[in-house]
């Protein structure tokens, strides 16, 4: 266990160093990281590093999504809600559908459920990498806003597709109509849970006598509470975290009026 922990810390340190090197050379760091990862994978004697997927989802995903939602402009997100929704839900589901039927037709023994599982994996584009590359180019702000907003939601939609495809494989039954209905139910209820949880946290911040340290601790806890609360009822924890992050960010000027609190938020 300690050996794996040391390897993970070494990899994280390597990533930080490569990101700084890419910024120094004025190269988009996603491209630099991909190339460096390919080189490292070819080095002899590098041990395999395996992470528990549940650990990754629980420890890393909620705070990363919450931070991304926090720094997303609500006004831009709402202004471009239609293209963002079409890309994050419509395009992801359409891509999964096409991948499912094409793979079923071309690969012998490939079931429709397996096709949707593959579609859920490959359908969400890496919008973070795209926006990082585009920020160095003369691209309209509208395009960047749409890509950043879409990147918040597309992982949620693809994870929902993946979840139902995996459940269909394990149970041996799959219905496209039921999957579509469950898709929107899980996503929609995830949004509801996110709004309820974020409203509750907003009321605590707003009306209880908290200090800057307590506000920082609550901010750190919020994404985990939203994620686990939604997952407890088998709804989308990702959608709950994104929704809650957008809501708290939009109300942050009412909550974090103290200068020390704002500095602590940046530190968190």
Image (cartoon, grey):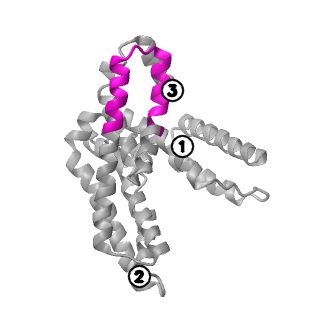
User: Mark 3 sits on what residue?
Assistant: 268
User: Mark 1 sits on what residue?
Assistant: 60
Rendered image: mark on residue 104: 2
59, 20: nearer the viewer: 59
Relative side of 26 to 4, left or right: left
Pointer 1 with pointer 3, Cβ within 8 A: no
Q: Is residue 218 magenta?
A: yes
Depth check, mark 1 against mark 2: the one in front is 1
Instruction: Please name the predominant secondary structure of the magenta segment in the image.
Output: helix
Disc 1 packing (10 Å; few <14; some 14–19; many ≥20): few
Between the C-alphas of marks 3 and 2, the distance is 46 Å
Snapshot quadrant of residue 131 = top left
- Residue 166: x and y in percent read 47, 68
**Looking at the picture, does residue 49 appear above or below residue 204?**
below
**Looking at the picture, does residue 176 appear above or below residue 132?**
below
Residue 28 visible from this viewpoint? yes
Q: Secondary structure at mark 3?
A: loop
Q: Is residue 72 magenta?
A: no
Snapshot quadrant of residue 164 = bottom left
187, 93: nearer the viewer: 187
- Residue 203: x and y in percent read 33, 24
- Residue 153: x and y in percent read 35, 49
Tag 2 or tag 3, which sits nearer the N-term? 2
Relative side of 75 to 127, left or right: left
Disc 2 packing (10 Å; few <14; some 14–19; many ≥20): some
Snapshot quadrant of residue 90 = bottom left
Q: Which residues are magenta?
A: 196-224
Q: Residue furthest front?
A: 233
Q: How many marks?
A: 3
- Residue 242: x and y in percent read 37, 42
């Amino acid at each position: 266990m300690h050996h794996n922990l040391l390897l993970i810390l070494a990899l994280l340190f390597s990533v930080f160093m490569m990101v700084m090197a890419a910024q120094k050379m004025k190269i988009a760091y996603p491209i630099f990281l991909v190339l460096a990862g390919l080189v490292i994978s070819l080095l002899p004697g590098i041990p395999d590093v395996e992470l528990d997927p549940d650990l990754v989802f629980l420890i890393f995903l909620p705070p990363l999504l919450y931070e991304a939602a926090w720094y997303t402009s609500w006004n831009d997100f709402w202004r471009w809600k239609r293209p963002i929704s079409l890309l994050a839900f419509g395009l992801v589901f359409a891509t999964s559908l096409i991948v499912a039927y094409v793979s079923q037709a071309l690969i012998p023994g490939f079931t429709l459920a397996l096709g949707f599982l593959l579609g859920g994996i490959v359908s969400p584009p890496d919008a973070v990498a795209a926006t990082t590359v585009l920020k160095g180019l003369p691209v309209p702000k509208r395009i960047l806003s749409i890509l950043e907003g879409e990147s918040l939601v597309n992982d949620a939609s693809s994870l929902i597709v993946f979840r139902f495809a995996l459940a269909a494989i394990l149970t041996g039954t799959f219905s496209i109509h039921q999957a579509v209905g469950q898709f929107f139910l899980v996503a929609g209820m995830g949004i509801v849970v996110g709004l309820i949880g974020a409203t509750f946290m907003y009321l605590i911040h707003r009306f209880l006598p908290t200090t800057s340290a307590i506000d920082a601790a609550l901010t750190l806890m919020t994404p985990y509470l939203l994620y686990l609360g939604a997952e407890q009822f088998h709804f989308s924890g990702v959608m709950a975290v994104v929704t809650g992050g957008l809501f708290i960010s939009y109300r942050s000027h009412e909550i974090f009026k103290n200068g020390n609190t704002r500095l602590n938020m940046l530190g968190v």
